Amino acid sequence: MKIGFLGTGSWGFCLASLLAAKGYQVVSWTTKPELAKQLNETREHPLFPNHHSKGDMVFTTDLSEALEGAEMVVESVTSAGMRPVFEKVKALGVPSCPIVITSKGIEQDSGLILPEVVIEVLGEKVRDLMGFVSGPSYAQEVIQNLPTSVVGSAYVDDVMMAICNTFTTKTFRVYPNADVLGVAYGGALKNVVAIACGVSEGLELGYSARAALMTRGLHEVRKLAMAYGCKAETLNGLSGMGDLFLTCSSMLSRNYRFGFQLAQGRSPDDAKKDIGMVVEGAYTCVSALQLSAEQDVAMPIAEVVYKIIYEEMHPLDAVRSLMEREIKHEHL
């Protein structure tokens, strides 16, 4: 099976390598000619020195080369890049094979999860082809074949099971979950909580504070997701609590690292430049507050993250504002 892969960042290269090592023919598209040249010549990504990809992999800047004859299309770009990339795909012809989203985010202003963005661009007829892979997984670990479990989701059972079977390896276990919206919300919103936990770490507030932020952050995510009809058990599973726990507890998380740097006095722009990769939580916190206003759901952690990034609120003032909130019952 030929797989057309869109995006060659850390996660894209990692998953493309995983699929190629399973024996699939993978053609990965990038907008960066020098990166494509380097990857074709060395099979070594600059973000993963000393790791050489295995299997049938080709890297190209020609989108049509990646898509032509593909029996599955896998996306790994960014939330903000989703719409323009699939506009380019549409110009070449709407795919008739499964389309798998691996990025995590919610589009600003429209409030659409990423599979729905693709459906809006390509047309309702691709809904039955859309799928999702999400869950607790660092590219740096997956590419070393360290074990983890994630979720494969789709609107149609056959596509969902095809995704699970295609991506599952001896160290990368994929569980089916038909709650596409819940899987998407969990993967996107946990990045906002991870920024808050990074801020807490940067301020040296201790493990107890981080545990409280993670728990109350999950509460926020679940409240908003359930307001849109998601299943609570999805948010308590791998694509919710599992992904949140991972992203909120390690410097391998770019969102956590971003929050840490903000607490150290770095500006958001300087912190992003230092990280060198897209910080999805900084984008998604805008979407989260737009959705929370629409549903009248309070999200105080997301609110202070937004204020730190976009309104120059001092991190210590953000902590103070959370601790001085009116006491309410813990549960939903």
Image (cartoon, rainbow, N blue to C red):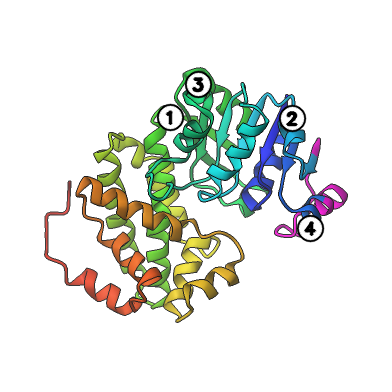
Residue 68 % position (x, y): 74, 28
- Considering only order in the chain, which callout, 4 or 1, is on the residue closer to the N terminus? 4
Nearer the viewer's eye, disc 2 or disc 3?
3
**The furthest residue to the right:** 41
Residue 187 sits above or below residue 71 on the image: below
Which range is magenta?
37-57
Q: What residue did someone put label 3 on?
A: 125
Residue 66 % position (x, y): 73, 35
Residue 135 sits above or below residue 37 on the image: above
| Label number found at residue 24 | 2
**Circle 2 crowding by C-alpha within 10 Å: few under 14, some 14–19, many from 20:** some
- SS at circle 1: loop
> Disc 3 versus disc 1: distance between alpha carbons?
21 Å
Nearer the viewer's eye, disc 3 or disc 1?
3
Q: What residue did someone put label 4 on?
A: 50
Q: Which amino acid does the dot numbered 4 rest on?
A: Asn
> Disc 1 versus disc 2: distance between alpha carbons?
24 Å
